[in-house]
Image (spheres, rainbow, N blue to C red):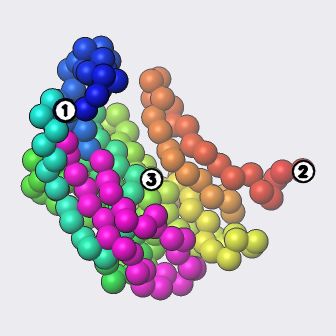
Amino acid sequence: VGGPLLAEALRGPLAGVADIVFGITLQFPRSFDPVGKVRTGAGAQLCKMNLRTGKVTVLLDDPKGDLRDIQVHYEGKKALFAYGKGGAPGMHLYEIGLDGTGLTRFTPEDKEVDTSPTYLPNDDIVFVSTRSHRYVACAGSYAQTLFRCRPDGSRIHPISGSLENARGPSVLADGRLIIMHWEYYHRP
């Protein structure tokens, strides 16, 4: 399985890692319009691969869906991801056990676009969403701002209020949150 680079990684930094989780999207999710029209994705899979045997297990398969932003939990037994069901509006946060069980939707099935989920150290979830309905004047779409919810998806509330997009929240080693932010209005 794999080549010399993988063999070297398995002896070093990946020595204790059995599996990796990855997504396959046949067409990168296209941008969503501000009114949340139905997407026409080309298909997506969420997979797990054993690094030693090369065996791939498909955890989720949607021939018309979009999938992105996979985040494995600190304990390595479940993962969060953004998923848009084929033929349905919006994109929502889901979690699944890495054994393929317990697929759970966390954000309401509506026209909003929820992406970039990440677990916080207390198991709350931070993500970006169009739920604030703030319009990016030059982009023709809603801005994606930061939101937070409890581990069961309850108590969704905004934690930022910008007119520009936030992307890719990540937790630093000291517990602070770092994001990519598009500075457009405040640039001068």
Q: CA distance from mark 1 to mark 2?
A: 52 Å
Is residue 157 at all visible to an observer of this figure? Answer: no
Q: Is residue 50 left or right of residue 86?
A: left
Amino acid at the residue labelled 2? Pro
Main SS, magenta region, reads loop
Q: CA distance from mark 1 to mark 3?
A: 31 Å
Q: Which mark is residue 1?
A: 1
Percent coordinates x, y for residue 41 in the rendering: 39, 75
Q: Please tell me which residue lies in front, 5 or 103.
A: 5
Q: Is residue 82 above or below residue 42?
A: above
Q: Who comes first in sequence, dot 1 or dot 3?
A: 1
Percent coordinates x, y for residue 22 in the rendering: 30, 48
Callout 1–callout 2 Cβ contact below 8 Å? no
Q: Which mark is residue 116?
A: 3
**Residue at 56% in and 79% down:** 33
**Residue at 47% in and 39% down:** 170
**Residue at 22% in and 51% down:** 47
Amino acid at the residue labelled 1? Val
Q: Please tell me which residue lies in front, 41 or 134.
A: 41
Is residue 17 covered in magenta?
no
Are there few (<14), some (14-19), or many (20+) residues within 10 Å of tag 3? many
In the picture, which quadrant includes the N terminus?
top left
**Residue at 29% in and 41% down:** 72
Is residue 28 at all visible to an observer of this figure? Answer: yes
Task: Specify start and end residues of the magenta stretch as a single range.
Answer: 22-50
- As helix, strand or loop, the secondary structure at mark 3 comes to strand
- As helix, strand or loop, the secondary structure at mark 2 comes to loop
Which residue is at the far right? 188
Q: Please tell me which residue lies in front, 20 or 92.
A: 20
- As helix, strand or loop, the secondary structure at mark 1 comes to loop
| Residue highlighted by disc 2 | 188
